[in-house]
Image (cartoon, coloured by chain):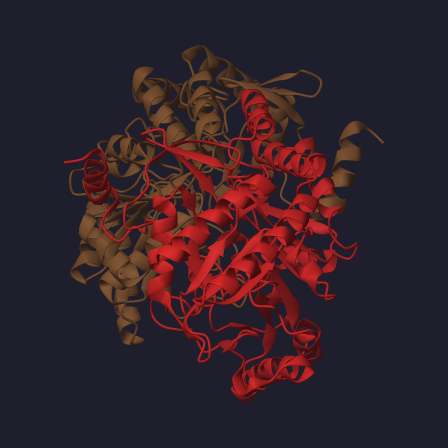
Chain colours: A brown, B red
Amino acid sequence: MTEIQTILARRERLLGPDNPLFYDEPLHLIRGEGVWLYDADDRRYLDCYNNVPCVGHCHPEVVGALCDQAKKLNTHTRYLHENILDYAEKLLAKFDDSLDRVTLACTGSEANDLALRIARINSGGDGFICTNATYHGNTTAVAQLNSIFEPIGGYAENIRMVPWPDSYRAQNDLDGEALADAYADAVQRAIESLAAAGIKFAGMLVCPIFANEGLPNIPAGYMQKAIGHVRAAGGLYIADEVQAGFGRTGTWWGHTWSSVIPDIVTLGKPMGAGHPISGVVARGELLDNYRRHEMYFNTFGGNPVSCAVGRAVINVIDNEGLVDNAAQVGAYVLREFRKLQMKHDIIGDVRGAGLFFGIDLVSDRATKTPDAAAARKIVNNMRDNGVLMSKIGEHDNVLKLRPPLCFSKDNADLMISTLDDVLAAA
Amino acid sequence: MTEIQTILARRERLLGPDNPLFYDEPLHLIRGEGVWLYDADDRRYLDCYNNVPCVGHCHPEVVGALCDQAKKLNTHTRYLHENILDYAEKLLAKFDDSLDRVTLACTGSEANDLALRIARINSGGDGFICTNATYHGNTTAVAQLNSIFEPIGGYAENIRMVPWPDSYRAQNDLDGEALADAYADAVQRAIESLAAAGIKFAGMLVCPIFANEGLPNIPAGYMQKAIGHVRAAGGLYIADEVQAGFGRTGTWWGHTWSSVIPDIVTLGKPMGAGHPISGVVARGELLDNYRRHEMYFNTFGGNPVSCAVGRAVINVIDNEGLVDNAAQVGAYVLREFRKLQMKHDIIGDVRGAGLFFGIDLVSDRATKTPDAAAARKIVNNMRDNGVLMSKIGEHDNVLKLRPPLCFSKDNADLMISTLDDVLAAA
């Protein structure tokens, strides 16, 4: 057996089959530094996928903060500690003034699970809207809002899934305001459907950039109209910033791309650059009212080590200008991807925000027929050529690129030229 | 304002009110080492409460493993890495051979949430039994099995709460086999009640030492009989080892105290000595069957850093003989607590397993009337005298002591003499 086969056999024996793995030839990674990952043969890969290590793999300032605090003290929030306060202050300063309270947990799933309860207690309702091509996490309650996998036991009656605002494959060839209206009308109809079923409406949980849906160019005015309907019906807007947040889109938050401030924001993945930390940021009255009804305590949430790490991540993003870098390198990459689109017919659409890109592959530009097989092949060929990426979208045909925020123009050039070669050979 | 008042004001402003805190005078802790915690004035406290830093606060081997791996690589399980395999092998070796698969997550709540779904898919049912004085975690689904706080929206129809097996305040003054039968009969009645409501039975989720209930001397034969009923009805036994596991009771697992091997075991708190790591260990067929029905992926779960930490924790427990230490020092403490019981009428009952103790305070030994006010006062007075502990139990009157596993006989003598003094002054 090769080394990889041995590892795969151990993995199946200890963890069981069906544990998700990337690539037809799985990668055995040993170390990481900045935008680079190295396998067991010390082969180098340009990481164009991992958003979690947002400041780059193993950033010395983040690792330093982790180690310094882990040597001193790691307890829970039933004792007082200033790390959680310093971190909360720094984090909340990145939001609109109305979002003035935070609760910390460990995973994005925990954050979304909690956000749903905050919305339930404050709305008095239990009806939720999400999109029809999404994933928000792995708890039992959050799995109800995942369209990608049907939850065990099936969907409950209180969930309505609406079409995500797809500007590329929009139904009826609408565009402009009519397109935004069409999608927002679907939200209104979902609210009415809940009411007709006697289910009081609680809110809408969406990624503000619709990352899992395929990162659309959101029709102008859509969020204002959709959330306008949500609020008119007494519901809350929960923005899932687990993927979109912390500078990913060239702004601090994905919701900044529309002019709608959420009622509740959930945070995760890049928050600790790999350290398990997540959070719910909300208008104070919402979180305080929740806490009057239910005790929420998370043993590891907000511990001094996690908060030291979270603070270091924000410091690095600020001090290294990574939000601006995401905007600038992101804009450059988008222009270059559009040039690739002119060369390669398979690229039906190119979309992006900051350092988050979707390249929509089609077998026919006229019919916009999604080409999932090509996406799979290209992702694997890119891996063989030393560039790591993945795919997403309702039709599983959208190349997904989401490198660490310290991604440089040189890194971008390598990624683009490799993709050009792989597309040419496909 | 004093320093503490300033911190409390910041805490309320940033985190909101109603965030749980210990002690009438909250503690502001700065550093920890072994069994000792130090406040901002460098005052030293003997930690007789914290089970999470099971190997002692800031153990150099655990911190070293954390830092070494954090400097190298921190990714997720969609790439191959040997840390998760080495750790899984080491962990599973601590269980009965039938428990041969593990899935890793970040918190005990996530582990219990997942365990419920594994039980649902394998039993084909949705009816669960828990006790009437318990807490299993903070997700929406797990909160349904918390008796301590009613979940938002109330309890669902599929939950039955049974009386916990209380040997001290047993109803009808039963003892011996009759007592075990009486409590196990309640489990059988709960199963029948689910059947009568048309709800298929899935299983029973319990802490195998009933820690939150008040750490009873479990009536001999109770677990065999209760779980016998569960299995006869097609249900699964989920042992919540989040508190009981990793040597706490002087054996590796709380379920070792009975002769019943669980179908599913959930792990958390001490697993990473403070680092957010949790897990579900189960019979392979159960976990594999679950994975055939639902994709479970946890971004931070099983990452190389968490697994390095988890492995270091097991190594330290083994190399420092901490399970034996818990058994030996625990037995000594129990004997000394029973001496205190002879001196102080307020001690109605003393219970313990390894380094986990419950001292049941009563206002009247004959009536066994719980004295929650005294428990609160004594916990606060112990804090003022430099010893940290808390309280638990259905009646909130049980002193809860659960020091790090490296707790020595000298540490025990200080704890016991301080408690003696505080009880004498009460």
Which residue is the extreme one toward the right? A1
Q: Where B399 sits versus A304, above or below?
A: below
Occupied quadrant, residue A291: bottom left
**Which quadrant: the C terminus of chain B?**
bottom left
In the rendered image, residue A290, in percent from the top left (x then y), is placed at 27, 58
- In-front residue for pair B321/B340: B340
Describe residue B109's horizontal placement relative to residue A113 as left or right. Answer: right
Q: Which residue is drawn at the image coordinates 73% and 40% (left, top)?
A: B90
In the rendered image, residue A183, in percent from the top left (x then y), is placed at 28, 53
Report if residue A349 is visible in the image.
no
Occupied quadrant, residue A100: top left
In the rendered image, residue B149, in percent from the top left (x then y), is placed at 37, 66
Describe residue A410's horizontal placement relative to residue A16 as left or right. Answer: left
Occupied quadrant, residue A169: top left
Report if residue A50 is visible in the image.
yes
Q: Which residue is drawn at the image coordinates 71% and 59% (left, top)?
A: B256
Which residue is the extreme one toward the top? A410
In the rendered image, residue B297, in percent from the top left (x then y), is placed at 56, 46
Q: Which residue is drawn at the image coordinates 28% and 75% (left, top)?
A: A196
- In-front residue for pair B417/A31: B417
